[in-house]
Amino acid sequence: MAELKNELVWSHSRARTFSGCLRAYWYTYYGSWGGWSSDAPAAYRAAYVQKKLTTRAMWTGTVVHGAAESAIRRLASGGTLDLEGGVRGTVQRAREDIEGSQTGAWLQRPAKRTGFREHYYGETVEPAAWDAALAEIERQVRGLHENKVFRRIAQVPERVMEVEELRRFRVGSAEVYASLDVLMADGAGGVVIIDWKTGEAHSDEVIAAQLGVYGIYAAQELGIPTDRVKAMHVNLRHGTLTLHPVGPAEIEAAREEIETSVASMRALLTDVAGNTTDQTDYPMVAEGNARCRYCSFRRGCAREN
Ligand code: SF4
Protein backbone atom coordinates (compact mmCIF):
# COMPACT_ATOMS: atom_id res chain seq x y z
CA MET A 1 0.00 0.00 0.00
CA ALA A 2 1.28 3.47 -0.87
CA GLU A 3 2.52 5.41 2.14
CA LEU A 4 0.03 8.03 3.35
CA LYS A 5 1.26 11.57 2.93
CA ASN A 6 0.54 14.14 5.59
CA GLU A 7 -1.02 17.02 3.66
CA LEU A 8 -2.29 20.34 4.90
CA VAL A 9 -5.96 20.18 4.01
CA TRP A 10 -8.01 22.98 5.55
CA SER A 11 -11.26 22.24 7.36
CA HIS A 12 -13.46 24.20 9.68
CA SER A 13 -12.45 22.02 12.63
CA ARG A 14 -8.75 22.35 11.75
CA ALA A 15 -9.10 26.13 11.77
CA ARG A 16 -10.81 26.01 15.17
CA THR A 17 -8.06 23.83 16.58
CA PHE A 18 -5.43 26.19 15.15
CA SER A 19 -7.09 29.14 16.85
CA GLY A 20 -6.75 27.43 20.24
CA CYS A 21 -3.50 26.05 21.69
CA LEU A 22 -0.87 25.67 18.96
CA ARG A 23 0.70 22.67 20.71
CA ALA A 24 -2.67 20.90 20.68
CA TYR A 25 -2.92 21.70 16.96
CA TRP A 26 0.55 20.24 16.42
CA TYR A 27 -0.33 17.05 18.30
CA THR A 28 -3.57 16.70 16.34
CA TYR A 29 -2.13 17.12 12.85
CA TYR A 30 1.59 16.33 13.15
CA GLY A 31 2.65 14.81 16.49
CA SER A 32 0.17 11.93 16.14
CA TRP A 33 0.86 11.26 12.45
CA GLY A 34 1.53 7.56 11.86
CA GLY A 35 0.51 6.73 15.44
CA TRP A 36 -2.08 4.29 14.12
CA SER A 37 0.75 1.85 13.38
CA SER A 38 1.76 -0.61 16.09
CA ASP A 39 5.44 0.12 15.42
CA ALA A 40 5.06 3.92 15.63
CA PRO A 41 7.34 5.73 18.10
CA ALA A 42 5.73 5.70 21.56
CA ALA A 43 5.15 9.47 21.70
CA TYR A 44 3.34 9.44 18.34
CA ARG A 45 1.28 6.42 19.36
CA ALA A 46 0.29 8.12 22.64
CA ALA A 47 -0.67 11.34 20.85
CA TYR A 48 -2.69 9.34 18.32
CA VAL A 49 -4.64 7.60 21.10
CA GLN A 50 -5.17 10.93 22.89
CA LYS A 51 -6.35 12.59 19.68
CA LYS A 52 -9.10 9.97 19.48
CA LEU A 53 -10.41 10.71 22.98
CA THR A 54 -13.87 12.14 23.29
CA THR A 55 -16.00 13.56 26.09
CA ARG A 56 -19.61 12.90 27.04
CA ALA A 57 -20.72 16.10 25.30
CA MET A 58 -18.78 15.44 22.08
CA TRP A 59 -19.83 11.80 22.06
CA THR A 60 -23.52 12.71 22.48
CA GLY A 61 -23.18 14.74 19.28
CA THR A 62 -21.41 11.90 17.46
CA VAL A 63 -24.02 9.33 18.48
CA VAL A 64 -27.01 11.55 17.60
CA HIS A 65 -25.43 12.52 14.25
CA GLY A 66 -24.88 8.81 13.56
CA ALA A 67 -28.54 8.05 14.33
CA ALA A 68 -29.67 10.89 12.03
CA GLU A 69 -27.31 9.77 9.28
CA SER A 70 -28.47 6.15 9.33
CA ALA A 71 -32.17 7.12 9.46
CA ILE A 72 -31.81 9.47 6.48
CA ARG A 73 -29.74 6.96 4.51
CA ARG A 74 -32.45 4.39 5.14
CA LEU A 75 -35.14 6.79 3.91
CA ALA A 76 -33.11 7.77 0.86
CA SER A 77 -32.66 4.14 -0.14
CA GLY A 78 -36.41 3.49 0.04
CA GLY A 79 -36.53 2.04 3.55
CA THR A 80 -38.91 2.94 6.36
CA LEU A 81 -38.21 4.29 9.81
CA ASP A 82 -38.28 2.20 12.97
CA LEU A 83 -38.11 4.70 15.81
CA GLU A 84 -38.26 2.23 18.70
CA GLY A 85 -35.78 -0.18 17.12
CA GLY A 86 -33.49 2.73 16.23
CA VAL A 87 -33.59 4.15 19.75
CA ARG A 88 -32.95 0.72 21.31
CA GLY A 89 -29.99 0.04 19.00
CA THR A 90 -28.51 3.51 19.47
CA VAL A 91 -28.73 3.38 23.27
CA GLN A 92 -27.36 -0.18 23.36
CA ARG A 93 -24.34 0.79 21.26
CA ALA A 94 -23.86 3.87 23.41
CA ARG A 95 -23.79 1.67 26.55
CA GLU A 96 -21.19 -0.53 24.86
CA ASP A 97 -19.12 2.59 24.10
CA ILE A 98 -19.06 3.45 27.79
CA GLU A 99 -18.18 -0.12 28.85
CA GLY A 100 -15.46 -0.50 26.23
CA SER A 101 -13.88 2.76 27.34
CA GLN A 102 -14.17 1.94 31.03
CA THR A 103 -12.46 -1.45 30.65
CA GLY A 104 -9.83 -0.10 28.26
CA ALA A 105 -10.93 -2.54 25.52
CA TRP A 106 -11.23 0.40 23.12
CA LEU A 107 -7.44 0.78 23.14
CA GLN A 108 -7.15 -2.31 20.97
CA ARG A 109 -8.83 -0.34 18.15
CA PRO A 110 -8.78 3.36 19.02
CA ALA A 111 -9.70 4.41 15.47
CA LYS A 112 -12.89 2.37 15.51
CA ARG A 113 -14.00 2.39 19.11
CA THR A 114 -14.86 5.09 21.63
CA GLY A 115 -12.53 6.20 24.39
CA PHE A 116 -13.49 8.87 26.90
CA ARG A 117 -11.13 11.43 28.35
CA GLU A 118 -13.00 10.86 31.60
CA HIS A 119 -11.72 7.24 31.78
CA TYR A 120 -8.30 7.79 30.23
CA TYR A 121 -7.47 10.52 32.73
CA GLY A 122 -9.30 8.92 35.68
CA GLU A 123 -11.69 11.85 36.14
CA THR A 124 -14.38 11.35 38.74
CA VAL A 125 -17.75 10.97 37.04
CA GLU A 126 -20.76 9.77 38.99
CA PRO A 127 -22.73 6.88 37.40
CA ALA A 128 -25.73 9.22 37.28
CA ALA A 129 -23.83 11.45 34.84
CA TRP A 130 -23.39 8.54 32.41
CA ASP A 131 -27.08 7.69 32.79
CA ALA A 132 -27.94 11.32 32.10
CA ALA A 133 -25.83 11.24 28.91
CA LEU A 134 -27.64 8.09 27.72
CA ALA A 135 -31.01 9.68 28.55
CA GLU A 136 -30.03 12.82 26.59
CA ILE A 137 -29.07 10.70 23.59
CA GLU A 138 -32.44 8.95 23.69
CA ARG A 139 -34.26 12.27 24.11
CA GLN A 140 -32.47 13.82 21.13
CA VAL A 141 -32.99 10.80 18.86
CA ARG A 142 -36.71 10.86 19.70
CA GLY A 143 -36.73 14.63 19.19
CA LEU A 144 -35.06 14.18 15.79
CA HIS A 145 -37.95 12.02 14.59
CA GLU A 146 -40.44 14.68 15.71
CA ASN A 147 -38.44 17.55 14.30
CA LYS A 148 -40.20 19.34 11.46
CA VAL A 149 -37.09 19.47 9.27
CA PHE A 150 -36.51 15.74 9.69
CA ARG A 151 -40.19 15.06 9.01
CA ARG A 152 -39.96 17.10 5.83
CA ILE A 153 -36.93 15.05 4.74
CA ALA A 154 -38.95 11.89 5.41
CA GLN A 155 -41.72 13.21 3.11
CA VAL A 156 -39.35 13.78 0.16
CA PRO A 157 -36.46 11.32 0.61
CA GLU A 158 -35.84 11.32 -3.16
CA ARG A 159 -34.48 14.85 -2.74
CA VAL A 160 -31.64 13.75 -0.44
CA MET A 161 -28.42 14.48 -2.34
CA GLU A 162 -25.77 13.83 0.30
CA VAL A 163 -25.52 12.62 3.90
CA GLU A 164 -22.21 13.09 5.71
CA GLU A 165 -20.00 12.56 2.66
CA LEU A 166 -16.44 13.75 3.18
CA ARG A 167 -15.64 16.01 0.22
CA ARG A 168 -12.29 17.46 -0.77
CA PHE A 169 -12.08 20.45 -3.10
CA ARG A 170 -9.88 23.40 -3.90
CA VAL A 171 -10.51 26.96 -2.70
CA GLY A 172 -7.91 29.39 -4.05
CA SER A 173 -4.53 27.94 -3.08
CA ALA A 174 -5.98 25.64 -0.42
CA GLU A 175 -7.27 22.08 -0.39
CA VAL A 176 -10.40 21.89 1.76
CA TYR A 177 -12.38 19.13 3.45
CA ALA A 178 -16.08 19.51 4.21
CA SER A 179 -18.80 17.10 5.16
CA LEU A 180 -22.42 18.27 5.10
CA ASP A 181 -24.83 16.64 7.55
CA VAL A 182 -27.56 16.66 4.88
CA LEU A 183 -27.79 18.25 1.45
CA MET A 184 -31.28 18.36 -0.05
CA ALA A 185 -32.52 19.46 -3.45
CA ASP A 186 -35.25 22.06 -2.94
CA GLY A 187 -37.20 20.86 -5.99
CA ALA A 188 -36.71 24.16 -7.83
CA GLY A 189 -33.07 24.04 -8.91
CA GLY A 190 -31.60 25.02 -5.54
CA VAL A 191 -30.32 23.20 -2.47
CA VAL A 192 -30.85 23.28 1.27
CA ILE A 193 -27.91 22.54 3.57
CA ILE A 194 -28.98 21.12 6.93
CA ASP A 195 -26.64 21.12 9.89
CA TRP A 196 -27.61 19.29 13.10
CA LYS A 197 -26.32 20.64 16.40
CA THR A 198 -26.64 18.78 19.67
CA GLY A 199 -24.80 20.86 22.26
CA GLU A 200 -25.59 23.53 24.80
CA ALA A 201 -23.72 26.44 23.28
CA HIS A 202 -23.17 27.11 19.61
CA SER A 203 -22.18 30.52 18.34
CA ASP A 204 -24.25 31.72 15.38
CA GLU A 205 -21.15 33.42 14.02
CA VAL A 206 -19.15 30.16 14.03
CA ILE A 207 -22.04 28.24 12.48
CA ALA A 208 -22.48 30.90 9.78
CA ALA A 209 -18.77 30.62 8.88
CA GLN A 210 -19.06 26.83 8.66
CA LEU A 211 -22.16 27.08 6.47
CA GLY A 212 -20.35 29.57 4.24
CA VAL A 213 -17.76 26.87 3.48
CA TYR A 214 -20.57 24.46 2.64
CA GLY A 215 -21.97 27.17 0.38
CA ILE A 216 -18.68 27.24 -1.55
CA TYR A 217 -18.99 23.49 -2.02
CA ALA A 218 -22.58 23.75 -3.31
CA ALA A 219 -21.81 26.63 -5.66
CA GLN A 220 -18.38 25.64 -6.91
CA GLU A 221 -18.51 21.84 -6.94
CA LEU A 222 -22.21 21.27 -7.68
CA GLY A 223 -22.79 24.36 -9.81
CA ILE A 224 -25.75 25.60 -7.77
CA PRO A 225 -26.38 29.35 -8.35
CA THR A 226 -25.41 31.19 -5.17
CA ASP A 227 -28.87 32.73 -4.87
CA ARG A 228 -30.34 29.22 -4.73
CA VAL A 229 -28.37 27.97 -1.73
CA LYS A 230 -30.14 27.97 1.63
CA ALA A 231 -28.75 26.74 4.91
CA MET A 232 -30.17 26.04 8.31
CA HIS A 233 -28.96 24.69 11.59
CA VAL A 234 -31.25 22.60 13.68
CA ASN A 235 -30.45 22.36 17.37
CA LEU A 236 -31.75 18.99 18.53
CA ARG A 237 -31.02 19.72 22.19
CA HIS A 238 -33.21 22.79 22.25
CA GLY A 239 -35.53 22.01 19.33
CA THR A 240 -34.68 25.27 17.56
CA LEU A 241 -34.17 26.07 13.91
CA THR A 242 -32.06 28.96 12.60
CA LEU A 243 -31.88 29.97 8.95
CA HIS A 244 -28.59 31.31 7.63
CA PRO A 245 -28.10 33.23 4.41
CA VAL A 246 -25.47 31.61 2.16
CA GLY A 247 -25.31 34.05 -0.70
CA PRO A 248 -22.39 35.62 -2.63
CA ALA A 249 -21.32 37.74 0.37
CA GLU A 250 -21.16 34.78 2.78
CA ILE A 251 -19.38 32.62 0.21
CA GLU A 252 -16.81 35.34 -0.46
CA ALA A 253 -16.26 35.80 3.28
CA ALA A 254 -15.70 32.05 3.64
CA ARG A 255 -13.15 32.09 0.77
CA GLU A 256 -11.25 34.92 2.43
CA GLU A 257 -11.33 33.17 5.79
CA ILE A 258 -9.91 29.99 4.27
CA GLU A 259 -7.09 31.85 2.48
CA THR A 260 -6.15 33.80 5.60
CA SER A 261 -6.33 30.77 7.84
CA VAL A 262 -4.27 28.56 5.52
CA ALA A 263 -1.65 31.28 5.18
CA SER A 264 -1.28 31.37 9.00
CA MET A 265 -0.95 27.59 9.13
CA ARG A 266 1.66 27.56 6.35
CA ALA A 267 3.63 30.34 8.03
CA LEU A 268 4.55 27.94 10.84
CA LEU A 269 5.76 25.12 8.60
CA THR A 270 9.47 24.45 8.20
CA ASP A 271 8.82 23.29 4.64
CA VAL A 272 5.51 24.22 2.97
CA ALA A 273 5.82 21.76 0.08
CA GLY A 274 6.63 18.90 2.44
CA ASN A 275 4.19 20.05 5.16
CA THR A 276 6.83 19.52 7.82
CA THR A 277 7.07 21.13 11.22
CA ASP A 278 9.31 21.74 14.18
CA GLN A 279 7.37 21.10 17.39
CA THR A 280 9.00 24.07 19.09
CA ASP A 281 7.27 26.43 16.65
CA TYR A 282 3.95 25.39 18.22
CA PRO A 283 4.16 26.67 21.81
CA MET A 284 2.17 25.40 24.74
CA VAL A 285 -0.22 27.83 26.41
CA ALA A 286 1.03 29.34 29.66
CA GLU A 287 1.10 27.19 32.78
CA GLY A 288 -2.25 27.45 34.61
CA ASN A 289 -4.27 28.05 31.44
CA ALA A 290 -7.75 26.56 31.91
CA ARG A 291 -7.55 24.81 28.51
CA CYS A 292 -5.04 22.30 29.85
CA ARG A 293 -7.43 20.98 32.49
CA TYR A 294 -9.65 19.39 29.83
CA CYS A 295 -7.15 18.89 27.02
CA SER A 296 -6.74 15.44 25.48
CA PHE A 297 -2.98 15.92 25.25
CA ARG A 298 -2.32 17.00 28.82
CA ARG A 299 -0.30 13.86 29.60
CA GLY A 300 2.15 14.58 26.77
CA CYS A 301 2.47 18.15 28.05
CA ALA A 302 2.92 17.07 31.70
CA ARG A 303 -0.14 19.19 32.55
CA GLU A 304 -2.22 16.51 34.27
CA ASN A 305 -2.29 18.27 37.61
S1 SF4 B 1 -2.21 20.40 27.71
FE1 SF4 B 1 -2.31 22.62 27.53
S2 SF4 B 1 -0.37 23.18 26.54
FE2 SF4 B 1 -0.67 20.98 26.19
S3 SF4 B 1 -1.68 20.85 24.23
FE3 SF4 B 1 -3.25 20.86 25.78
S4 SF4 B 1 -3.86 23.02 25.99
FE4 SF4 B 1 -1.90 22.96 24.93
Image (tube, helix red, strand yellow):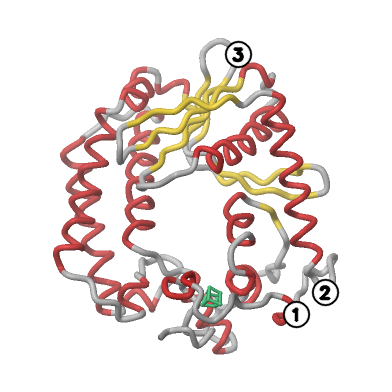
Point 37% across, 25% down: residue: 149
Q: Give the answer, above or below, for where 51 lies relative to 87.
A: below
Tell me the quarter of the image containing the C terminus. Answer: bottom left
Q: Secondary structure at mark 2?
A: loop
Of residues 123 and 181, the one drawn nearer to the viewer in this rendering: 123
Tell me the quarter of the image containing the N terminus. Answer: bottom right
Quarter-of-image position of residue 69: top left
* The label number, if any, that marks residue 278 in the structure image: 1
Q: Give the answer, above or below, for where 291 lies relative to 239.
A: below
Q: Amino acid at mark 1?
A: Asp
Residue of label 3: 189
Quarter-of-image position of residue 275: bottom right
Residue 74 location (% of width, % of height):
35, 34
Is the residue indicated by label 3 positioned so its CB lies within 8 Å of ligand 1? no
Q: Secondary structure at mark 3?
A: loop
Point 74% across, 61% down: residue: 265
Q: Secondary structure at mark 1?
A: loop
Instruction: First in sequence, mark 3 or 2: give its number.
Output: 3
Q: Residues within 10 Å of mark 2 (few under 14, many from 20)?
A: few
Residue 3 location (% of width, % of height):
70, 71
Q: Quadrant of ligand 1?
A: bottom right
CB atoms of marks 2 and 1 within 8 Å? yes
Quarter-of-image position of residue 227: top right
Label 1, label 3: how many angstroms apart (C-alpha)?
Answer: 48 Å
**Which of the two discs, 1 and 3, sits closer to the camera?**
1
Instruction: First in sequence, mark 1 or 3: give its number.
Output: 3
Residue of label 2: 270
Point 41% across, 65% down: residue: 112
Q: Give the answer, above or below, for where 224 lies relative to 136.
A: above
Q: Give the answer, above or below, for where 159 lies relative to 16.
A: above
Q: Amino acid at mark 3?
A: Gly
